[in-house]
Structure formats: C-alpha cells, structure tokens
Image (cartoon, rainbow, N blue to C red):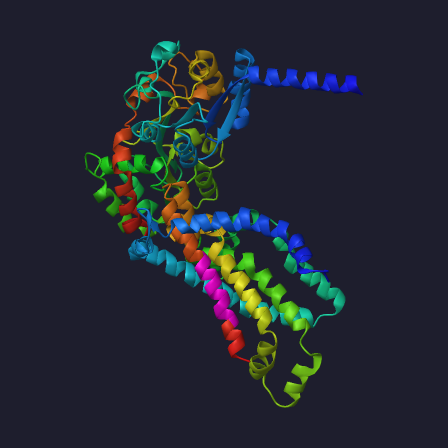
C-alpha cells in the first residue's frame, strides 16, 4: 500500500506518540510505583496488601462478582441472541435497538434507578410481599445482590451484542440439520452453537468481566462501604487516605486480572478446537 | 497594512500590561454551593479589591495534596478546609501563621473560631453541629446509644469512618456507651457486632437524604448543614437533642506559607469574616456564621448552627486527637465493621 515502510511509520507516528506519551508512559509510571520500596524494587507492597484480611475479602469478592456477572450474562445473552437472530429483519432491528438503548444512558442514572427499585418500598419488595414470600421488606440495597444486579444490567447488552454478531454468522441449516439427525437442544448448544460462536463468547465475556472488575459507580452506589470492591477500595485509597502506593497496587492487580481473563478465555476457546 | 500591524501590536502590549497589573488571588474551596458563594462572596470581593479570584475546588485530600506538592512555590494562596486537615498541613510546615491584627473582624469571632488548631495557624469561618436525624412518627431518640438499639435494627445508617462525620459519631457513641477519652476500640467493636443491622455507612449527606426520603433509613447522625434536606420533607423528620449533647466542628481558612500574596490574602479573609459577608452567606443558608455579630431570622437560624449558646455547647473532638488516631480507627473499623 505504501511505497516504502518509512511512509507507513510516518503516518502511524502521531497516533503512536499520542498513545505512548499520554497513556502508556503515565500508566507505566503509576504502575512502577507499586513495585518500589525505599528507592529499590520490591514486591513487599503486594505481600503487605494481600496479607490483610480485608484486602483478601475485597479481592475475592471482586473476582466472584465479575465471574458471576459474566456467567449469568452469557446464559441470558445466548437465549436473547438466539431469539434476536431468528426474528424477521424489522423486528430484529427494533429489539436490537432496545438492547443497545441502555448503553446510551449514563451509568449513574441507570444505577440510581436501582436504589428506588431495590429499596424497602420499591417494586421488588412490593412484589415479594405481594406474592407472600415475606411479611416484611427484605434488605437488598447495599448487599452483594444489589451490586450483582446493577453490574448485570450494566454489562448484559455488551454480551448480547457480541453473541448476536457471532450467531449471525452461524450457518442457517446447522441447527436444523443437527435436530434432524436426532440431537437434543443441549447437544445442539454444546456441539453446534457454542463451538461456532466461541469468539463472540470470548469477546463478550472479556468485556463483561473486565467491565465488572473496573466499574466504579455501580459498586459505590449500590454496595457502598459495606460491599467494598477493588475499584471502590482504590478510590478510597486515593481520595481518602492519599495512599497512592496502595492505589497503584490495586490498579496493577486489576490490570493483571483483566489481561489474565482475556488470555484464559482465549486459551479455553482455542483448546476446544 | 503596516499601520494595522502597529495598532495590533500596541493593543497586544497594552492588554499584556493590564493583565500583568491585575492582582490575582488563588483560593482552594469545597465544591459545594459555588454559585451561591459567587454571588455572596466572590463577585463582591472582586469588585471591592479590583482583583481576580481564581477558584480551585475538589475534595479535601486532592486539595491538600496540591498544597503539599507545591510547597516550594505555592499555587494556592488561601484555602478553606476542616480543622483537622488544617492541622495536618500545619504539622507539615505548609501554613503561614495568621497575624490576627490584620483581620479587623477577628475580635468579632466566637472564641472557638479564633485559634481552632493552635499556634494561630488558621481561623474558623463556620461551625456545624452534628446530631441525629430521625423519623419522629416511628421512634424517639434520646441518646446516641439509641443508634444501636433493637428499635432501629435494619433501619439505621452511620457515617463512614473516612468522612468528617465518622469520628464525631464515634466520639458521641463512645460517651453514650460509657467510655471516656478517644480510645474508640470498644465503640468500634460494638458497631462491628451490629454491622449487619446497619443499612450502610454513608459518605455524603445527599446520599443519606435520599435513603431517608425513601424510608430505607429512619435514623442517622448528620451535620446540621444538611438539615434543610430533611426539614422540608413531608415525612416527620426531627433533629434529636440527645442527653449526651450534640457534637460538631469548625471549618477554617488558612494561608499557605511563602505564597507572596499575603496582603491580598488577608484582605480576602477579612472580607469573608466580616459581619456583612457572614450575614449574606448565612442568609443564603450556605454556612453558619463564625462571626458573633451576625443576626439572622428564626427561619434562617433553623437551618444553621447559630448562636453562642449552641456553639458553646458543642461537644467537639480536638483536631489533634483526630489526626493522631485516625489511621488506627480506620484500620480497626475496616477489620471489625467493614470486614
């Protein structure tokens, strides 16, 4: 395309400089703080961080909620995507638009709505009492359940979009052929749909999991101080304690978790081939 | 064309000279009510001094970090902050000593506002009382200990330890539970035992107001500055007068060391502390006055921490006690309450 490689490099240089100077360099400096102690390099900061029971709880909670949100998103996402791709084009456009619509609304507004919905006088508790499941309102706000629901609602569209894209490329007759040959729906899913849509699952899973790990607003509003997650703990370290070393350690752990998840999901997808 | 170039250059030079001649004062303030402050304080001061105010806002930690990072060449001239945060800055030798003779309103201040952190390193500009807001139609609050009673199980919120209200609540709860001094170990453990019965540990009073409006919470400690969020509600909110008394604090204004803008800084501080401005700010229900000559109507006073009797009765915790013990409280809190 280019007459020589120099032209290509020259054209890429502004973008590379932009990313290098304004993103990679500051992130590198920030992360390097997490490996420094008394002027030398050390992992002691990580050892101290992980050795505290509160930090262990927060780390495991973050991992657990990220995994749960990704797993439930995948289940709901497959069902939704399957329905969407089998609709007529007009209906598909409408439904797909409804899936995308929440992404255009501020996460703050969406999360605040959950405070009303999940409150003692909200529709969830009204329904629970109305159905006779409990005599008194149950506390959902400021629990892991509230954070889970908020994150699921926040990131489910990303999973559905990824899976719809993959399913649209699924050979039309593959499912029918499998059914004709006697496969039940579980076999159709595990032998046909899952292998052929794994790229969408990996992409959706990565987006949802990493999004759940790094989302701040939803855990802060729906979990508060009682359901600390790594991202809310990071904010606390910076804005309350002015402890940038601990904040850098948490940031490094979050980045490592995101990259690790992406690699793991890719490995799993590759292993099934 | 040549003439146009001369004229443009001359105008540019004049503008540059005018720019250089204009005095500027950089102040660091809390983010809230900036429109009201502009009307009551900033605009009138700029008009009076013929200078330009540069306003920097942010949370306390960010603003303190900026003062510390620029200690050699201060970019902030005057800051307003809590008394214990001011003491933390003073201990790092970042503040200039306040010469009270340069503040004509100094003698009009309540005694507790004249030297709140010691060493004349800061001057109080506002007081706030803290007590318990509760639903009078559902329960009665007579003591701080009622916050941990079975009557409010699952319906009470407490301020998080990391905020200003956290240590104040611990201070009063400790006294209610029969402990003297600032060793809050037993109190934090008592809260830890009831942690599951507490709806949340709130960070902002606006968050608490929403939770109380939607009846998630029926009792919580809060600063008087937030009372207007509750007093206008259709729900029956009441401000408690516990038998242990009300607690509270004072926010202060300070001047950074060697900022080179001391004269203008004193002029601004004096203006803010004047009866005229303190009255205007009080009537806008922004801050309670530290100037004892301020007179406001009963309706305005209802929203403020107002009057010598109330201010002198506040059961405050010393800024030094907060600074010296806060890290230990936070560690214990995280261990037994947040878990």
Q: Position of residue B237 (x, y in %)?
A: 42, 35
Q: Position of residue B175 (x, y in %)?
A: 23, 35
Residue reaching furthest right?
Answer: B1
Q: Is residue B245 visible?
A: no
Relative to B185, B92 lies left or right: right
Closest to the observer: B252 or A89? Answer: B252
Which residue appears at 67% of the width and 68% of the height? A84
Relative to A28, B243 lies left or right: left
| Highlighted magenta segment, given as a residue range | A255-266
Which of the 4 image quadrants contains residue B39? top right
Relative to B85, B55 lies left or right: right
The mark total stands at 0
Residue reaching furthest bottom?
Answer: A181
Closest to the observer: A84 or A4? Answer: A4
Which of the 4 image quadrants contains residue A198? bottom right
Look at the image and say whether residue A256 sits in the magenta stretch.
yes
Magenta: main secondary structure equals: helix
Q: Position of residue A156 (x, y in %)?
A: 56, 61
Relative to A185, B331 lies left or right: left
Decide: is A65 above or below B319.
below
Where the N terminus of chain B falls, by quadrant? top right
Decide: is B222 above or below A263.
above
Q: Is residue B75 visible?
A: yes
Q: Position of residue B188 (x, y in %)?
A: 26, 44
Look at the image and say whether residue A51 sits in the magenta stretch.
no
């Amino acid at each position: 395309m280019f007459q020589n490689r120099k032209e290509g490099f020259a054209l890429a240089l502004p973008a590379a400089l932009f990313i290098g100077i304004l993103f990679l360099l500051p992130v590198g400096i920030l992360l390097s703080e997490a490996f420094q102690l008394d002027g030398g390099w050390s992992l002691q900061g990580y050892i101290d961080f992980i050795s505290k029971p509160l930090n262990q709880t927060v780390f495991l909670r973050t991992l657990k909620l990220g995994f749960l949100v990704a797993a439930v998103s995948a289940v709901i996402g497959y069902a939704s995507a399957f329905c969407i791709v089998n609709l007529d084009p007009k209906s598909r456009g409408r439904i797909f638009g409804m899936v995308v619509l929440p992404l255009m609304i501020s996460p703050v507004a969406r999360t605040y709505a959950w405070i009303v919905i999940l409150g003692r006088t909200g529709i969830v508790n009204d329904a629970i009492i109305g159905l006779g499941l409990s005599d008194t309102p149950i506390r959902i706000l400021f629990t892991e359940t509230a954070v889970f629901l908020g994150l699921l609602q926040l990131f489910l569209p990303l999973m559905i979009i990824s899976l719809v894209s993959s399913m649209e490329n699924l050979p039309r007759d593959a499912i029918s052929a499998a059914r004709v040959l006697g496969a039940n729906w579980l076999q159709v899913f595990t032998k046909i749909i899952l292998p052929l849509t794994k790229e969408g699952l990996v992409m959706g899973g990565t987006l949802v999991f990493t999004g759940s790990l790094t989302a701040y607003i939803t855990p802060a509003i729906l979990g508060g101080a009682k359901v600390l997650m790594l991202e809310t703990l990071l904010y606390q370290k910076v804005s309350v304690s002015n402890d940038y070393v601990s904040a850098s350690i948490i940031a490094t752990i979050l980045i490592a978790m995101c990259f690790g998840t992406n690699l793991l999901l890719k490995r799993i997808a590759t292993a099934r081939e | 064309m040549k003439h146009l170039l001369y004229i443009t250059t001359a105008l540019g030079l004049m503008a540059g000279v005018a720019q250089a001649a204009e005095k500027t004062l950089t102040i660091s303030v809390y983010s809230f009510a900036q429109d009201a402050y502009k009307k009551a304080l900033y605009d009138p001061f700029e008009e009076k001094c013929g200078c330009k105010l540069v306003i920097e806002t942010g949370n306390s930690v960010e603003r303190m970090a900026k003062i510390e990072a620029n200690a050699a060449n201060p970019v902030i001239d005057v800051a307003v902050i809590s008394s214990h945060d001011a003491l933390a800055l003073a201990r790092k030798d970042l503040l200039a000593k306040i010469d009270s003779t340069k503040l004509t309103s100094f003698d009009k201040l309540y005694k507790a506002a004249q030297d709140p952190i010691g060493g004349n390193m800061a001057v109080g500009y506002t007081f706030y009382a803290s007590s318990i807001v509760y639903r009078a139609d559902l329960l009665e609050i007579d003591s701080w200990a009622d916050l941990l009673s079975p009557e409010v199980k699952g319906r009470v919120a407490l301020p998080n330890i990391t905020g200003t209200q956290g240590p104040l609540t611990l201070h009063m709860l400790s006294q209610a539970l029969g402990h003297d001094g600032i060793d809050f170990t037993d109190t934090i453990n008592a809260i830890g035992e009831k942690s599951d019965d507490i709806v949340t540990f709130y960070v902002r009073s606006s968050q608490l107001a929403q939770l109380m409006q939607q009846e998630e919470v029926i009792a919580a400690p809060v600063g008087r500055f937030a009372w207007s969020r509750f007093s206008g509600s259709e729900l029956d909110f009441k401000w408690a007068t516990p038998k242990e008394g009300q607690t509270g604090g004072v926010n202060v204004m300070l001047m950074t060391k060697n900022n080179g803008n001391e004269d203008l800084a004193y002029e601004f501080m004096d203006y803010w502390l004047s009866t005229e401005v303190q009255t205007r700010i009080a009537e806008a229900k922004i801050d309670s006055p530290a100037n004892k000559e301020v007179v406001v109507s009963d309706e305005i006073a209802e929203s403020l921490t107002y009057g010598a009797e109330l201010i002198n009765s506040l059961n405050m915790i010393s800024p030094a006690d907060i600074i010296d013990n806060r890290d230990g409280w936070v560690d214990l809190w995280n261990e037994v309450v947040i878990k």
